[in-house]
Amino acid sequence: MFAENQKISVRQLQVLLLLYYFGTTALFLPSDAAVTGGNSGWIVTILWGVAASFLAVLFVYLGEKHPSYTAVEWYRRAFGRHLGTVLALGLGGKIIFDGAMELRLFCDIISSSMLPRTPQWLIIALTLFLCCLAASYGIECAARSGEILFFAVLIPLVVVLIFVAISTNYNRLLPVQMPAFSSLRESMPFFAPLLQGFMVFLFIFPSLEKRRHMKRRIWLTCLAATGLMTVLVFLSLAVYGTAALSEKLLPTLQMMERVSFSGIFLGRQDLFLLWFWMVTTFLYVTSLIFFGQELCSRVFQSKKNKRNLWLFLFIPLLFVVALLPKDMAEAYWLRIRVTPWLSGIFFVALPVLMLFIDTVKGRGGHE
Amino acid sequence: MNKWKWVFVTVIPLFLATGCWDKRDPEDREYMITMGVDKWESGYSVSFAPANTEEGEPQKMLCRGNTLADAIAGNDSRNSKKTELGQMKMIVFGKSLLEDSEKLQSFLEELKRSQEISKKVTVLGTDGTAEACIDAMLKEDDGTGLFLWDFYKNTAKEVGVTKSLDMDTFFTELEEQNGSCVLPRIQPIEEGLHLGGGVALSEFSLAAFFSDQEEQGYLFLVGEAEGAVLEADDGGKKIPLRIARSRAKYKFETEDGKTVCHIRLRLYGELLGSANTDAFTEEGAKEMENLFTEIIKEKVENTIKIAQEKETAEFLGLAVRLRQKNLDDSGNFWEEVTISIEPSLKIRDTGRIR
């Protein structure tokens, strides 16, 4: 049941954050980790995951200082009205880019593995329609859906991973080596999509109910997600070894496919498990559309009941940008090249700068 | 717009549009269960054993082309139904293809990229033509088209003369062992099909055929010899023993400046016949264990000898283990490494008599 108060709890936020981690990133990451980190790809995943968890704590700290702010108010307050508005519109661009690329990559996977003859635009349009419907009901709808789907997504995934872990020979992980600094640097663009879920921190604080122990809870959520990601990379390396893993496009799905155990009646678990990623993509794009609406409403100070009108701006933009790359490879490389810059600016540089300005000017009543 | 209009606008297209483009009824598809591939002039000769979806026995389908895609396109142009590879269970590589490294690699690249073919497909090699195997298989089959698949699902693990290999593992082993691997072997014989032995590939080309006995040696080496039946001669009496559990552990050590690879085989067996000694006593069991340990050692050494003759340690998986331990491997395995086979067999069951 919806309370229809547009508020979500920290637990719901934790669930959403965990699901955001398991978007298309989880499908590509093991292969990227093998390319850049070799046998130590799983250690690289831990390092970036832990770094990301500290960044999440910084966001929560900032959010607790200004609980009624979204990114729009943060930017305006820290950088002045005009520059703040420009930065907020830039963030809008990032929302569209992230959403469109996630949508495009996912629809490409669906298209190539399940519906090869169905036009790309139709799959994108239908997914967008559903996301649009959920976003029109606000973040509470996404949070509730996440809460319900969380168990349907993660429990089967964990069960399959346990079976993979039991049936795997770990020789391929040898020799265990620490990653070189150069491989850490090279891996950065490939791990940048891990931060894509952090968009939630820039908009969620006004919609949050009680925030007890929020820093610790969010930190633990990020660590749990890092743990699961590391297990995915670790098992992929154990199953395929660095050389074979490096050349795979979607190793996570392929790894799921090879699992067979007593009682299983499905021949292609990979296709069955694909719907779990459908859920995460649906929730992620829904949340991004909602954040886009919030951003526009606050930048242009439109009335709350007119919020859904911004869908008519966001949906066509997402649709067009998602169709711009000519194939999956172009969408993938575009995301790898652009995301580190956008995430670096909006998720690292600006928050650190805002914290600095807050500290210097003594702003923000910490709750 | 009220919420019901939203629901209508978003949900209705799902029912109207989903799957229209990809809709193809099962009766319009020809489901292929087994594929046999041989070399043919400039390309490949591909034989299919289709699933039995209609009345009557399924007939072999033969198509030729420069690539797999070309061959399938040719097959489609001659048939009223679309060739469907999504349900395929087995792929048999003929000797002619296994001998041609370049052609084999091109074909494997196509299989690797294919979205349609499941990576769980079992791969096999034959010392004849794959087409002959498909013919023999269709004769053996009870009409379901799943004869080979059933064998590898139900029996292969329990006979200890062959090992099922799925395509995903096949590609992984080729990648990490520089194009080397041991495929399960299939042979058309007068009585039908013989499923046993192995086909060793080295650098994407045929290196050797393993007999059932040599394959057993290989299975001991990889710790997957469960079900293997060994026979010992005890004073003119033949005593059978079945391997119930098989494990292999590798340890590389430097002894007097030379690398020694200790292969420790931990085995548990079940005595199936009566010996001259009382196998239920400690001394009797020890005697039997020593007898069979020697047999196992000899089998493994014979298999290793084949690899030494071919001057490669890749297809037995020895070289890759050395690389995992020692990053400075020069690549000359047999000169650098001495093998020490150390089997240890424990008879855990003597049956209902002593």
Image: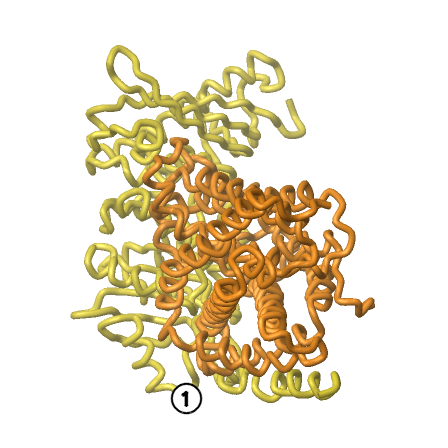
The way the protein has been coloured in the rendering is by chain
Question: Residue B221 in the image: x percent, y percent?
Answer: 39, 33
Q: Which chain is orange?
A: A
Question: Residue A331 in the image: x percent, y percent?
Answer: 39, 67
Total numbered labels: 1
Q: The disc numbered 1 marks a residue on which chain? A: B
Left or right relative to A157: residue A239: left
Q: Is residue B76 visible?
A: yes
Residue A134 or residue A170, whichever sits in front: A134
Q: Is the residue A49 above or below the residue A201 in the image? A: above
User: Label 1: few (<14), some or many (≥20) within 10 Å?
Assistant: few
Question: Residue B175 in the image: x percent, y percent?
Answer: 31, 48
Q: Is the residue A249 above or below the residue A187 in the image? A: below
Residue B310 or residue B108, whichever sits in front: B108
The extreme left residue here reads B41
Q: Callout 1, which amino acid?
A: Ser
Q: Is residue B158 visible?
A: no
Left or right relative to B3: residue B16: left
Q: Residue at x 25, y 58 (%)?
A: B105
Q: Which chain is yellow?
A: B
